[in-house]
Image: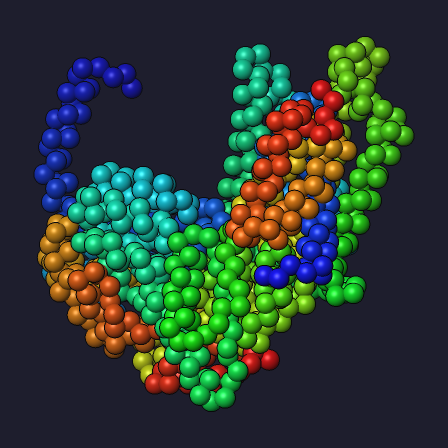
Amino acid sequence: MNITRRNVLLGATAAAALGPIAARAQTSEVVIGVIYPFSGASAQMGVDAQKSFETALDIINKNHDFDLPLAKGEGLPGLGGAKIRLVFADHQADPQKGRAETERLITQEKVCAVIGTYQSAVAVTVSQICERYQIPFISADNSSPSLHRRGLKFYFRAAPHDEMFSAAMFNFFDAMKKKGAKIDTLSLFHEDTIFGTDSANTQLKLAADRGYKIATDIKYRSNSPSLSAEVQQLKTANADVLMPSSYTTDGILLVKTMAELGYKPNAIVAQDAGFSEKALYDAVGDKLEGVISRGSFSLDLAAKRPMVGKVNAMFKEKSGKDFNDLTSRQFMGLLVMAEAINRAKSTDGEKIREALVATDIPGEQTIMPWKRVKFDEMGQNNDADPVLLQYIGGKFVTIFPPQAAIAEAVWPMK
Amino acid sequence: MPVTAETIIQSLASGLLMGLLYGLIAVGLALIFGLMDVVNFAHGEFLMIAMYATFFLFAFFAIDPLLSAPLVAAALFVFGAVVYLLIVRFAVRAKANAGMVQIFSTFGLAIVMRGLAQYFFTPDYRSVTHSWLGGKTVSVAGIFLPVPQLVGALVAIAAFGGLYLFINRTDFGRALEATREDAGAVALVGIDKNKVFALGWGLGAALVGLSGAIMAIFFYVYPDVGASFALIAYVTVALGGFGSVFGAFAGGIIVGLVEATTALLLPPSLKAVGIYAVYLLVVFVRPRGLFGSM
């Protein structure tokens, strides 16, 4: 078609006529931006996250008989039954791409809230952009403690951060020592972005406070082609516990290299990430019998709360996997955000923020072992109790804290 | 960490084994560059599909990577030749901006291959869970030599030896060398330049295919796996001297050793720094690379 003045005029008139309809149509739909790595080394995390968010979306937008926020009835009743639509953006694990994509989500896609991001390093820039545009951001699965301490008003995290996770690990060590286990020295092994660095800093501080000796503290470059030099150093240090903070690729390579160099630690207590990933256990699970990882989710909970098993089945149908620590937190992230938007009765950023500040969801209305969801003045939920899980016989069982445990820890690993 | 004689020897041994493999990966790149002055920016993706091929042969037909290595190398040979005939052949003919056209044709191929791998194989991390060599280790006087890397090193030496003989002792090899020296002149004596270039691409791809098959034993596979190895391969080729097959192989060994030594002396997160520092030093002193002749 040739572009003539007449056509332009016609188009403009049509657009003007359709304008009010479009404006009205917007209220029947609430758009939320979801920003994850969908390509690059962590692309699988994004793919799994997408399935998790779609499961939560299904629960919000359709009628379900679960005791979860917005499960009953369709859509958001506070906005006249408006449905939520998710717009997925790919940050490729790159903080700068995260920044650009968030800006695009807010200005082009007109999202009223953002959820992300897997990598904490990316959450830093994404949350800054959200702050600038006054759009609430939920850090669904980022665990770096420094994230919520930057005084951002639009930053919220329903899940625990690494200080809470690490404290659980050290509480566990203390408890094991009381029972007579020998735990004096620790080896830290962490990747070199904000996740690994924050995790190690927290562990260093806790170790000093509670009188554990750090045998070695290895910061390594993520996605290295080889980890043999690093493993060699871990082997020389031979601490009572190895504490890795690694994403999946490095975790697989670490475990393979450990086997090759003949390093068998007494115990591994991992800071989740790669060590909660099915791919890692598919690859090297046979070498990981007895590994302990922190988590905020455990399928054991299904015994007490049957809906956990049912929601997990919904997710499994989409993804072929059980919920893990990451996907469960992503799922809850969207539910918490949607619940706040519903109470805000608005898609205005400031109103949603106010609703988030007032959030108070009891633990029984989540799929997590949390006490409740209630944010402090920094936007952090301090009632998100972490658990420790041990990989026994091909699955994870909860071993700590005692009130959540269903089995005794096997110590040492083998 | 206490630096003992044992840790030094262990680090050097690990570095040497890894370096031989880096060398094998880089040799294919150097061969193609030496032959026709084209840098294959999809080299890492060639490695990636070789690893996937090895993984799938293992997953579906339970073929051990050691057995599938020749199959994968043969398949990559065909793939490399086809890439030349379908893409590179036309890219080098470009009249304007020939350099850019070449770069973007193989660079584009890399992105397409990565995208297709992500689409068809999903971005999940795959791994050959058990193999004849996997997880086995030889221990000599407290020094651990992982069997997969040890065999990889032997394969690398054998492949390099084979390539050397092929280039120097066969008619095809001589045609390859002649074409590399003067592609215009060989046409006059009746050698089909395209055939020789296709053979060169096939050989280069077969070598990286061999590396991929061996690496699948001890490394994980996912669509982006080629990226980090390809970067090392480019540095290796530049360090050893552009176009020099021998230089690429020696460069690989140097890179492996430098990487291991740096990790001993500096925090491991900085171990790549050593590689690039040595590279910068070489480029500064000898811009054509250690064994470069141009």
* Residue A264 visible somewhere in the drawing: yes
Side of A380 relative to B103 (left or right) = left
Residue at 62% from the left image edge and 37% from the top image edge: B278
Q: Quadrant of the rendered structure where residue B37 is?
A: top right
**x, y percent for residue A299:** 40, 76
In the image, taking residue A300 as reference, residue B94 lies left or right, namely right
Q: Position of residue B223 (x, y in %)?
A: 54, 47
B24 or B77, which lies in front?
B24
The image position of residue B272, as x and y in percent, is 57, 44
- The colour style of the image is rainbow
Name the residue at the right extreme: B169
Front in this rendered view, residue B180 or A78: B180
Q: Residue at x 39, y 79 (%)?
A: A171
* Picture coordinates of residue A137, whole percent (x, y): 24, 53
Q: Quadrant of the N terminus of chain A?
A: top left
Front-lying residue, B159 or B113: B159
A24 to B140, vertically: above or below: above
Instruction: Please name the residue shown 70% across and 41% down the image.
Output: B254
The quarter of the picture where residue A62 lies is bottom left
Q: Quadrant of the C terminus of chain A?
A: bottom right
Q: Which sits in the foreground, A243 or A282? A: A243
Name the side, left or right, on which B128 lies relative to A30: right
**How many numbered circles are shown?**
0
Can residue B238 be seen in the rendering of this structure? no
* Residue under the point 66% across and 53% down: B216
Q: Is residue B3 left or right of residue A317?
A: right
